[in-house]
Structures are given as C-alpha cells and as structure tokens.
Image: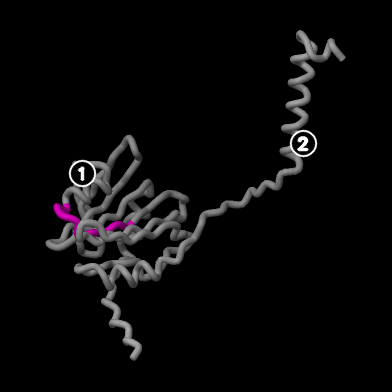
C-alpha cells in the first residue's frame, strides 16, 4: 500500500480516482439541454406604476412573439418613480424598457444608456427617438425625453428588435381607486 501513497504512482493513482469520481458525477447528474429563461408577470408592476407615477406610464400592449419578460422592478426613490421592464428577445438578446421622472432627466438617461453621447435619431411611427450606442458594451439605446419624465429602450438587442419593442408601447390609464371597505 505504501507505494500508492508516495511518488509518481501515488500522484497517478490520485488523479485516476479524481477523474473516475468526476466521470461518475457527470453520468448520474441530470442535465437539461433545453433553454430556461425565467418568466415574470409584470402586470402588477404595470398597474402600480400607472397608479403611483405622476407621469404617463407606457407599457407593451402585447409581448412580442418568442420574447420572454424576465424582470420587472418598480422603485420610488427621492420622490422619483422608476419602472424597469426587461426581456429576453427572440434572438436571445437583452432589451429593457426604463422610465422615470428622476431629475435631471439627463442623468437617468445617461445611466440607462451607459453613455452621454447621442448618435443620431430614428423615426418610429412618426415619433423621433434619439439613438445612442456604446460599442464596448454592445449596447444600443433609444431615448425620448418629455418635460416631466424620460423613456429609455436599451439593451444588447439589435436596432430592429428595439424598434419592435418601441412599436408595442402604449400609454397606460391610471387605475381607478379601490373602493374602501366600510
């Protein structure tokens, strides 16, 4: 037994045992080859954003085919209401709709776009959106700034996918107040 615990034979034996253990682990561990992207229901955040925001919230009127809504967060910080809604696109890139009444709007837009440099504009259904592109992050951004808030559509998705998301955006009506129990 001594010769298996010392020298080259010991190292070779230990390596063989480790490789056998890893091989056995890989054989008995279930593996899935199917894609799993977590899906979120953003309807509650959409209603709450429309209720709490002092500006007109926009949201997708429908989820595009093969797109997966995978994140939604509504925050109120320093008096600003911000809603972020993320998607995995049909091409499995990332796209996000973000809107806020944070002041100044330029700070919010620059943070979401990861750049403060406009790169042109794009007409989408008769509305002008500012384009921004940050090459090192492969991030494209479409921006609209209103007097009371800003809307940003951004991500690694290509311009066509971001444009498709913009085309689904529709204003959301303020929900009526819940009746009080009494």
Q: Residue sitting at 19 percent across and 47 percent down? A: 120
Side of 162 where 123 appears, left or right:
left
> Is disc 1 in contact with disc 2, using a CB cutoff of under 8 Å?
no
Q: In whole angstroms, how far apart are the C-alphas of marks 1 and 2?
A: 54 Å
Q: Is residue 46 magenta?
A: no
Mark 1 or 2 closer to N-term?
2
Side of 15 where 70 appears, left or right:
left
Residue under circle 2? 24
- Front residue (pair 34, 159): 34
Residue 52 figure quarter: bottom left
Side of 81 where 158 appears, left or right:
right
Query: x%, y% of residue 63?
Result: 42, 66
Q: Which residues are magenta?
A: 97-105
- Front residue (pair 137, 175): 175
Q: Residue sitting at 26 percent across and 53 percent down? A: 142
Kindly identify which numbered label has been placed on residue 119. Answer: 1
Q: Residue sitting at 38 percent across and 49 percent down? A: 157
- Asked if residue 175 is positioned above or below residue 33 in the image, the reply reads below
Query: x%, y% of residue 146?
Result: 15, 61
């Amino acid at each position: 037994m001594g010769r298996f615990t010392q020298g080259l034979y010991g190292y070779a034996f230990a390596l063989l045992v480790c490789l056998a253990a890893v091989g056995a682990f890989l054989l008995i561990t279930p593996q899935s080859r199917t894609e799993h992207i977590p899906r979120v229901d953003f309807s509650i955040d959409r209603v709450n954003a429309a209720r709490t925001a002092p500006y007109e919230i926009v949201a997708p009127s429908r989820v595009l085919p093969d797109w997966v809504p995978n994140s939604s967060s509504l925050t109120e910080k320093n008096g600003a209401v911000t809603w972020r809604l993320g998607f995995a696109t049909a091409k499995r890139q990332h796209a996000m709709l973000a809107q806020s009444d944070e002041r100044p709007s330029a700070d919010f837009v620059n943070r979401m776009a990861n750049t403060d440099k406009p790169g042109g504009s794009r007409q989408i259904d008769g509305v002008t959106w500012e384009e921004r592109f940050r090459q090192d992050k492969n991030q494209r951004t479409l921006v609209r700034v209103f007097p009371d808030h800003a809307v940003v559509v951004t991500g690694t998705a290509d311009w066509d996918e971001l444009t498709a998301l913009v085309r689904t955006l529709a204003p959301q009506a303020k929900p009526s107040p819940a009746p009080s129990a009494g």
